[in-house]
Amino acid sequence: MLQFSRQRSRFDILVLIESFYLCKKSWQMSTQEIKQLLHESIENIDDGEFLIAVKQIIDRKYTPGTVPNLSEWQLERIESSKEQIKHGKSLSNNQADLLVEKWLNE
């Protein structure tokens, strides 16, 4: 967590209060307009500590995830597996563990 000096904290509180009142206007904007304004603002801020604080706030709502890039064969296997499960053709975890143990001992 960031630690700000008392002077910096008072300044940040004033900025937050001012932002709150300015936000009332932004509530009338579309989400896309707000994103555009935020993007533009962030591009023009050079205060590293402030940007880290903003990132910490954003991280509470959004964590970037990676979407696996699957091959056609992998996608087909997933669909085939889903169909097998639908028709009751699956193993319990215990059954799968026993099967793997058997293969490893061969």
Image (tube, rainbow, N blue to C red):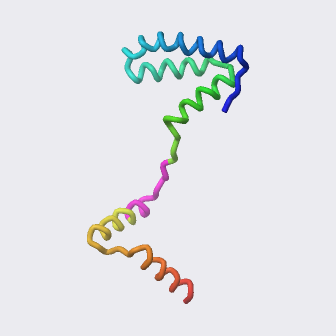
Q: Is residue 77 above or below residue 91?
A: above
Percent across and percent down for residue 89 are 31, 75
**Quadrant in the rendering for residue 86:** bottom left
Give the residues in magenta: 67-76
Mark count: 0
**Quadrant in the rendering for residue 75:** bottom left
Question: Does the segment drawn in magenta span residue 49?
Answer: no
Percent across and percent down for residue 34 are 45, 20
Residue that sits furthest to the right in the current view? 5
**Quadrant in the rendering for residue 54:** top right
Percent across and percent down for residue 23 are 46, 14
Residue at 65 percent of width and 12 percent of height: 11
Question: Does the segment drawn in magenta span residue 69?
Answer: yes
Residue that sits furthest to the bottom in the current view? 106
Query: Is residue 2 rendered to the left or right of residue 101?
Result: right
Percent across and percent down for residue 2 are 68, 29
Q: Is residue 2 above or below residue 75?
A: above
Residue at 42 percent of width and 12 percent of height: 24
Residue at 31 percent of width and 70 percent of height: 84
Q: Nearer the viewer, residue 74 or 54?
A: 54
Residue at 54 percent of width and 31 percent of height: 58
| Quarter of the image with the C terminus in it | bottom right
Q: Nearer the viewer, residue 100 or 4?
A: 4
